[in-house]
Amino acid sequence: MRARTEDILRNYGVSARNGFLPEQPPVASLPDIYYAPWESILHCLPTLITTLSIRSEIDALPLLDTSRLHTEAEWQRAYSILGFLTHAYIWGGDRPADRLPPQITCPLLEVSEHVGLPPTATYSGLNLWNWELKPDQVDLTKPENLRSLQTATGTRDEEWFYLISVSVEAKGGPLIHAMLQCVEAVERGDDEAIEHHLRHMTVGIQELGTLLNRMHEHCDPQVFYHVLRPLLAGSKGMAAAGLPNGVFYDEGNDHGQWRQYSGGSNAQSSLIQLFDIVLGVDHHATGSSETKKLADSSKTGSFIQEMRNYMPRRHGEFLSYMTERGHVREYVDKQDLGSTIRSTYNAAVDALVAFRNVHIQIVARYIINPSRCPPSERILQRRSLNLATASSRAGEAGGLEKQQLAGTGGTMLIPFLKKTRDETGEAVMLE
């Protein structure tokens, strides 16, 4: 007897209602007063970064262990806290810090092992586990109903940037259920059900694109590029910004190691990868030598595959499970030309292409365009940070059009995104 859809989702830590977001809102603070030193610094984080005092405050922290974390929500809160403190310590100065002190390293390594994520700020810590509903609100799909538990800059721009992603995940929650049901319909050869779920996916993906397009409402491109983006940068491929070896994670007593990680990136969203899996989109390593470099960015294969290492362990396992089961495109490909199931499938693929076009437009507006303009006086008053400065200087020397700006996840942005979109479009079938 096959397991129920709801039970399968639950086994992989996926909510039938909220998708990859937790079923209940994240805890707003760790309940044990033992962790008050972490919470206290986090509460003042924007001020400590602006006044260049974040490192001295973290250096003065006691070395706390993780033995008093009990619920999964507490472990997730600790991971989010330590991720913010890690990036604040590395990037919150005139020069980047290439050493992370034991006060952060030791508990972060333990927490990261528990939640199955790298010891750095990821999409999970910045978005999935960093939100709460405003009083009397219940709809997670509307970003205006939410607020972030934490930001690094204290700006509405940063908060809105996170909350758009939270709302996209919430809106996509019911689609995960539909995608699993679509795969089950394929396995039993139920064409009517397959078409029903594909139509549901098409409408849902279109709604996600509309939601993503709301980014401009409260997130200013200059603030994002010059103030927030530097703090989201990882430690991988950051030689130009002052981290040729990455960061040394000091565990004390002459122990530790150099580590390099990608920064927080929407490529770490399990939801977006799930669409590709179910629709049978093949992100292959073809094209110019430049695009092949993107696919060879890690030992595990393509950058997209590598980003699964930046997802909660059970979510990544769910994607692997769906890869084994998802044969929607193969099934549709066997249908006769002119079959309505083909046109229904193609409409879902077209919707995903359109969604990726929206993402490309946002990247152009929030990264490419502001990289070509000097920061405004308002931005300069906040202090220009390392990654933005390094990118601007590289642009002055060689031209940003030739340089191809890299994202916080570590890829050359526009070539990567266009390649991903074009590969999505290749899944469309003759009708």
Image (cartoon, helix red, strand yellow):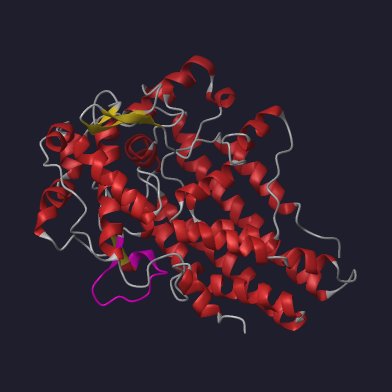
Spot occupied by residue 326 in the image (x, y as percentages of width and height): 68, 65
Instruction: Name which residue lies at 13% across and 32% down.
Output: 56
Q: Residue furthest right?
A: 337
At 11% from the left and 42% from the top, the residue drawn is 62
In the rendered structure, does residue 208 fall within the stretch colored magenta?
no
User: Is residue 218 at all visible to an observer of this figure?
Assistant: no
Residue drawn 66% across and 74% down?
A: 182
In the rendered image of this protein, does residue 20 appear above or below residue 98? below
Relative image position of residue 355 (x, y in whole percent): 59, 56
Pinpoint residue 416: horizontal percent, then vertical percent. 61, 39
Quarter assignment of residue 384: top left
In the image, is 177 to the left or to the right of 108? right
Q: Is residue 385 above or below residue 10?
A: above
Q: Position of residue 333 (x, y in %)?
A: 83, 65
Side of 108 where 220 appears, left or right = right
Which image quarter: residue 306?
Answer: top right
Q: Please report the bounds of the magenta region as a residue range.
A: 131-144
Can see residue 74? yes
Q: Main secondary structure of the magenta part?
A: loop
Seen in the picture, residue 384 relative to 333 is either above or below; the reply is: above
- The C terminus is located in which quarter? bottom right
